[in-house]
Amino acid sequence: MADLSINLAGIRSPNPFWVASAPPANTAYQCHRAFEAGWGGLVWKTIGEPIVNVSSRYSSLDLNGQRMVGFNNIELISDRSPETNFREIAECKKRWPDRAVIASLMTDTRENWHEMMKRSLDSGADGVELNFGCPHGMCERGMGSAVGQNPDVIETIVGWVMEAAQIPVIVKLTPNVTDVTRSARAAKKAGAHAISLINTINSITQVNLDKMCPEPYVAGQSTHGGYCGPAVKPIALNMVQGCAADPLVQLPISGIGGISNWKDAAEFIALGSTGVQVCTAIMHYGFRIVEDMIDGLSDFLDSKKMKSVNDLRGKAVHTIGNWENLNLNYKRIASIDYDKCIGCNLCYIACEDGAHQAIALVSPNGHGLGPGRLPGKPVPQIKEVECVGCNLCSLVCPVDQCITMVDVSTGKKPMSWKEYQTRLAAREMKAIPAHA
């Protein structure tokens, strides 16, 4: 069985699955429940000067009957005193010495950062996470994403923290920037031990058309919130990979953003994360989802003959580069398994109206009948010469593995766009008369 334990900048945990700094990490009671379920670590809900939250606080994007594909919140940091939070951190760490307990912090002045670092150390926390990502409420007070959107301010505040740091420091980055690697570089330059990303994305998920106000609303008014959940995973993966590949960052990464199962976690780790943090999926399904995450990741690593999580980390980072370097002479085309085809012909409609008109409807003669398909009804057929391999048909097909993409030989040597432009320029030069 593969070793699932990780070491993130000196912070050890028995598996890579941590509860993210959010409502599920608000109290000692929740921490105990999380660790009883099997979570390897927990990042406490952000501690700072206690705030007063509003009612209501959450909204979601639902899609085709699936709840909470995207999740929006306007909740702020902990509304409990630092004394209470640090006392409960100490309680949790004493009871669970093998789990990672991280204090998430947000404050303002140099002196206050020093004080928070001392209190974190005294509580027994394994490390701290600096919340530079909250996109609402706190940023109006000069904290949260107001810090994370300015690399110079990141460098200054992380520098203050490092003056007092005696335990590992993780900097949590906001995605509400043009280039997150600039933020990561600033954290690295100031001495941070690790980074975590992404925090939530500015959003409005829906408008209540009866109230004519976005949800959630407070006495007929609303505000932009922080967006998370499965819908943000592609953005998070892109930013994690960008930081992992940047030679000027090179910091351990705690990946966050839409992680709901072991496969999501494996993708983050393959793109450079040491471990992952989960919030929305816990709020949706509860702490016990970690059981399937642990089993699934363990089985996957065993199937790949990987001895530890470390063997997976970063495996996919360097397969991503600039478009101009992709092979223009590589080709994949669609292939239909007619024993699985149900005759919905959605692939034909999608290709005909939304792609490259490379699917025809033909007589079913010679094709087996898949489940639910009506005898005599036309079936889709790939026009192999015209298929450009865009993948759309396989993506819209409602039956798993009914349409797959297969490699075909073009008989041509690999050639990138960059090489193509070079050859084109050379041909044009040869065509110019010598006296011109």
Image (tube, rainbow, N blue to C red):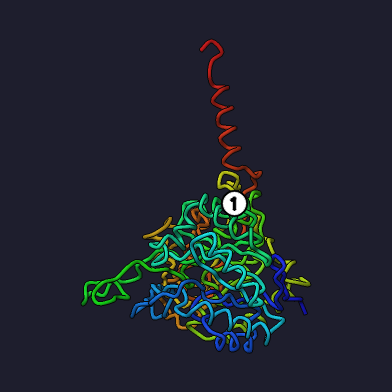
At mark 1, the secondary structure is helix
Residue under the point 58% across and 72% down: 264
Question: Residue 346: horizontal and vertical position, in percent?
Answer: 41, 70
Residue 259 visible (yes or no): yes
Residue located 43% across and 63% down the image: 360
Tag 1 residue: 185
In which quadrant is the N terminus drawn? bottom right
- Pick whichever, 110 or 131, lies toward us: 110
Residue 421 or residue 283, whichever sits in front? 283
> How far across and down, in percent of the image, does residue 233 sit?
51, 67
Pinpoint residue 191: horizontal percent, then vertical percent: 65, 55
Can residue 62 be seen here? The reply is no
Asked if residue 147 lies left or right of residue 241, the reply is: left
Relative to 34, say whether 426 is above or below: above
Q: Quadrant of residue 379?
A: bottom left
Total numbered circles:
1
| Left or right: 214, with 391 as reference point | left
Residue 393 at x, y = what percent? 47, 65
Q: Residue furthest top?
A: 435
